[in-house]
Amino acid sequence: MAKIDTAFIDLGYLDTLATGDSIIHRLDPRIKVLTAAVFVICVVSFDKYVIGAMLPFVLILSLLMGLGGIPAHFILKKLALVSPFAILLGMFNPFLDQQTLLYLGPLPVSGGWLSFLSILLRFCLTVGAMLILIATTGFSGVCMAMEKMGMPKIFAVQLLLLYRYIFVLMDEGQRMYRARALRSFQGRGTDMKTFGHLIGGLLLRTLDRGQRIHLAMLCRGFDGTIRTRRAPQFTIRNMLLFFLSCLILITIRRYDCSLLLGQLLTGFVK
Amino acid sequence: MSHHIVEVQNLTHTYPDGTAAVRGISFRIHHGESVAVVGANGAGKSTLLLHLNGYLTPQSGTVRIGDFPLTRETLRDIRRTVGMIFQDPDDQLFMPTVYEDVAFGPLNLGLPLEEVEQRVQKALMRVGVEHLRERPPYKLSGGEKRAVSIATVLAMSPDILVMDEPSSNLDPRARRTLIELLAGFQHTKIIATHDLDMVLDLCSRTIVIREGQIMADGPTTEIFQNDQLLEECHLEKPMRMQACPLCNRPSI
């Protein structure tokens, strides 16, 4: 429980970051969502043994983090929290694919290890990009942007309400959990049956709250559609910015910059 | 809208499980009046309030708000006229930011965007929370949440304010700020509460409800001096009117 607890408090921190004011924060949310999508596609489309060519993307993320004022340790901690999924996905690669592909000095490195590291790197890059997107745009900003770009309004509203009330629900669940913990001694009263009652109670409370929220909406003239602020027009400047960032992303996807840099440096040395 | 009258006649309401929550209530509240509805838990206060903005329609009897009787056709006008402030601000603030929450009502009224902007700004200024504009509601303190929920209602420019336990869960300072704020409003006010000290500050008239019926309806000071009535209705004299054990001031 404590784990989930801190994870959610950090969700709040993500929101605090989103209220910041930096050059990245001020960009149009739609640009950020689209660019993030291009970024993710670029990263996942690499061949399975690639590592070096992906490194410039790390540089881009660090740059964005710096510009947006996002503390690196926060992103790293979040990545560590979800990394077990990626590790689980790739951990058998070193055993299944033992063909040696390259030598690091005297050390032979098998294709399995390479693809495992590649998976981890991809994971860090994509999840990191999403975290930075939300930390500089805010969850509601991302929802609105997706809605403006054609996501059905009902999904956007669902997501927004979910995000709004997940905190209230967590709070309520935690209070019930605490109330039970304080009165269950030596593990008694912590069985599945009481857990069922707890969940049932939470469901009933949630239904009640849902009804009250609906009432509150009705009181203010709700007629089935949620109207929100209209986003500003997509300006030429925004368009240019988007194309520029796409150009950069696709260039470093297309050309192995690490390799080119390496060749350049070794050329100098010679 | 020169006369924001609230008139309830012989109102009854029985819930599907057979609980008769309101059993023949009649009263008439005039323009600019500030009225407290007090009574024990389960006396029928909340059920009564739910009729005033048309969430429940009368099973028998009538409710008239201003010039309209409460029917399905007039619901929209009535909800614009009557602003309802809920007991739990978390129920009232459902949008991602304070701004959007306050703008929710005016946008639903179909007002032009500049007008919405003005109204939001004015409402936030009125309750003194302009600085919270872009904040998400779940991060606010109890007092701030309460102020914002009042702003969400003010932005609709209602004539009548209906409040359910506005001072509950507030620290003394926040409660005092709220009372001062409410005292400055010109609206017709109907406040259901257990906070009788606040009633003393805000409402010149009090309606006492017990088991779905009106036990007394009159000037607040008179009602609060009727010890027997208060006792019967599970109420207690406001602290300020009670005897002081330290300075030996007698009870009023």
Image (tube, helix red, strand yellow):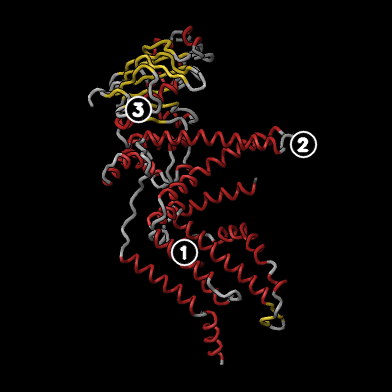
Q: Would you name the residue on which mark 1 appears?
A: A36
Nearer to the camera, A198 or B119: A198
Residue A66 image point, x, y percent: 48, 64
Report the mark closest to the observer, 1 or 2: 1
User: Image quadrant for the C terminus of chain B?
Assistant: top left
Tell me the chain of label 2. Answer: A
> In the depicted view, which residue is nearer to us: A17 or A49?
A49
Q: How many marks?
A: 3
Identify the secondary structure beneath mark 2. Answer: loop
Expressed as whole percent of the image width and height from the top left, the position of residue A14 reads 51, 53
Q: Distance between the residues labelled 1 and 2?
A: 50 Å
Please determine if labels 1 and 2 lie on a single subunit.
yes
Q: In the visual, does A241 lie left or right of B111?
A: right
| Label 3 packing within 10 angstroms: few (<14), some (14-19), many (20+) | many
Residue type highlighted by circle 3: Leu
Circles 1 and 3 in contact, beta carbons < 8 Å:
no
Q: Is residue A241 above or below residue A233?
A: below
Amino acid carrying mark 2 in the image: Gln
